[in-house]
Image (cartoon, rainbow, N blue to C red):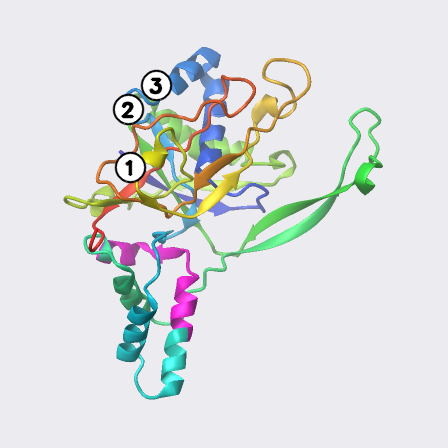
Amino acid sequence: MLYRYKIIPRAPLITPLMSDTFFGHFCWALWYQRGDEYLTHFLDSYGKGKPAPVLFSSAFVSGHLPRPALPSLGWHQIKEFVSTHFRGGKKDLFQGFSRIKSWNKRRLISVHQWLQLKEDYSEEQLYEAFLSEEGIVDERISELEIAMSNMIDRVSGTVTQEGGGLFAREKIWYHKGIDLDVYVEVNQAEIEDIVTWFLTDHLHESGFGADKSIGMGSLSISQDDSFDPDQFAVPEPNARLSLAMSSFPGMESYDASYRLKTKFGKLGGMFASSSPTGGNPKPFKKPILMYEPGAVFFCSNSLNDRSLLNNVHSDDRIRHCGIPITFPFKLRGG
C-alpha cells in the first residue's frame, strides 16, 4: 500500500530529507521499540523475492515529483519547438530559447503535470506543459547557510587547536509556508502501525538527522488523507520513475537514465559515538554511488523486491537501503 505524508519543517536541517536516511532512522526506531532480534529479522526479510516490508521516498516540495532524468531535446527539435511557439521575430525567439534554458534546469514537475503525461511522456510534451503554466514556478524553496562551529576536545572539554579548531556546517532553512511530501510504501500489514508511529510521533519527538539534540531537524508530520494511490496507476508501462536514492545489487543490469551522487553515509543512534563491535567509534560507511531521485529505469516491473546493500561498513551487520519507490509510466518511443 502506498501512502503520502505531509512534512512541515519547524527548524533548520543539517541532514537532507533523503530516502535512505529515513530508512536508517526507521531501523533505529525499530531497535528501540522491538529490540535487536526483531531488527535483524526485519533486515533479513529484504530481497527474498517478495516486496520490501517498507520503503521511503525522499521528500519533495508538496504537490511535486522529481523530474525524470531524461536527455533534453536535440538542437533541431528545440529550434522547431521555439519556432512554433515563439513567433514574432528575433526577440520572441530569444525569449523562447531562454525559457528552454530555464526549463532544462528544473528538477521537479508538478503532480498535475505528471498525471497528464504519465501515459504518453516525452520531453516535448513536458515543454508543452511548462509553456501552459501561468507565471514562473520558483523552485527555490530553501536557503543554505554555511555556519562555522568549534571542534571540542572530548577529554579536556576545550576547543581543539588542530585545524584552527573550526569546521563548517551547512544548514538548510526552508521558506515560510513550505511543506513537503514523502511517499511510503508498506507491504506488510503488521508494521503499518509502527510506520505511522515512526513518522507522526517518533520523528516529531526525536528530530531528523545531525544535531537533532540541539533542535535541528524538527519536523511536524501527518498522513495525507486526501492521497489516492490509484491515480498513479498506468496500464502496460515501459518505464519507472524513481522517487528515492537508488543503489541495489544487480542495478547495473537495468537500462536507466540518471544523475549520480556519491553518498558518504554515517551511522546514527548509539553507533554515531561508539563502534558497533566495541572499541573506537567507526561512524562512517563506505562511499556508495547512487542514482538521485528522478532516475528512469526502462522496465515495467516494480523494483521493490530488490535486496539491501551489504559490505557498506567494516561491521557486516550494517546494511544500506537503496531500493526505490517507483512510479510506472509510458515513455513515448520507449
Mark 1 and mark 2 lie on one chain; the one further toward the N terminus is 1
Q: Which residue is mark 3?
A: 45
Q: Quadrant of residue 154?
A: top right
Q: Is residue 104 magenta?
A: yes
Q: In the rendered structure, which amino acid carries the disc numbered 1?
A: Leu
Q: Residue furthest left?
A: 235
Q: In this image, 64 relative to 141: left or right? A: left
Q: Amino acid at mark 2?
A: Ala
Q: Main secondary structure of the magenta part?
A: helix
Q: Residue at x 38, y 47 (%)?
A: 258
> Quick one: label 1, few (<14), some, or many (20+) residues within 10 Å?
some
Q: Is residue 309 above or below residue 66?
A: above
Instruction: Say which of 135 and 324 sits in front.
Output: 324
Instruction: Tell me if residue 40 can be seen.
Output: yes
Q: Earlier in the sequence, mark 2 or mark 3?
A: 3
Q: Which residues are magenta?
A: 98-116
Residue 281 located left or right of residue 27: right
Question: Which residue is situated farthest in the top direction here?
Answer: 37
The kind of secondary structure element at disc 3 is loop
Q: Which residue is mark 1?
A: 2
Marks 2/3: CA–CA distance: 14 Å
Answer yes or no: do the residues labelled 1 and 2 have beta carbons within 8 Å? no
Between disc 2 and disc 3, the foreground one is: 3
Work out whether mark 3 precedes mark 1 in sequence or the reverse, and give the earlier one.
1
Which residue carries the number 2 mark? 189
> How many neighbours does mark 2 have within 10 angstroms: few (below 14), some (14-19), or many (20 or more)?
few
Total marks shown come to 3
- SS at circle 1: strand
Q: For residue 120, what is the image quadrant?
A: bottom left
Q: Residue 265: x percent and y percent?
A: 54, 33
